[in-house]
Amino acid sequence: MKNIPRIFLCDNIMTGMSISAPHDVVHYLTRVMRRHDFLAFGGGTEYNAMLSDDNKTIMIGETTSHPDPSNNITVLFSPIKKTDDLLNMATQMGVSGFQPVITERTVANHINWARMEKIVTESAEQSNRNSVPKILPIKKFDEIDLSHIAFADERAAYGAELPGDARGTTQILIGPEGGFSDREFAALDASGAIGIGLGKTILRAELAAAIAVSRMLQ
């Protein structure tokens, strides 16, 4: 079943359902893939599915044996110029959600969030997940509970000692392209947030997110 298409429909599909076929799904199956059978997924489960002969209805069949490789990590991040790359990579790594956070140095204020939703959906389809991560409403830095999170701490690149252990933490905060401000570092330190060092070089935010998630999964 390696070449069968995988398509996200919605989170509440189940065996026996018949739903109206979205135009883009019909076009993809009939014009691009030239087939009517596919794998539908949503809410952590994958199903065998079939597009009707008249291309109007999708029938949801039995579940497959494919487990969902997703995890329970939420990435809190400052929107950046390459937000699409950050979301794409982290989705492929199985994260459960994204929380945009406006920091003092956030500069990418005009993100097309509808396009970002499309990117994470396509990334989930491609990466063999059974679920699509949620993109949560934007919050300001001061609205975030910092006491139970880890964060990518670029101070490690300048020799700072980071005694914290982030294993078991389910939230990771990634700063903006200009880094956290002194006030934000002070707030993170005072709250008990766990700094994660990502090496001796300063990384772009999209790469920092991917490496931070991988550290949390170790």
Image (cartoon, grey):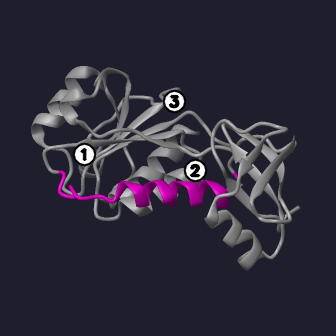
- The image quadrant of residue 147 is top left
> Element at badge 3?
loop
Q: Quadrant of the N terminus?
A: bottom right
Q: In the image, which residues are magenta? A: 106-128
Q: Circle 1 is placed at which residue position?
A: 155
Instruction: State the image coordinates of residue 181 (x, y, percent, origin top left).
Output: 13, 43
Residue density around tag 2, few if under 14, some if 14–19, many if 20 or more, within 10 Å: many
* Placement of 31 over or under 86, stated as above or below: below
Q: Circle 2 is placed at which residue position?
A: 93
Q: Earlier in the sequence, mark 1 or mark 3?
A: 1
Q: Quadrant of the C terminus?
A: top right
Q: Which mark is residue 9?
A: none
Q: Tell me which amino acid carries mark 1.
A: Arg
Mark in front: 2 vs 3: 2
Can residue 13 be seen here? The reply is: yes
> Element at badge 2?
loop
Q: Main secondary structure of the magenta part?
A: helix
Magenta-drawn stretch contains 114: yes
Q: CA distance from mark 2 to mark 1?
A: 25 Å
> Element at badge 1?
helix
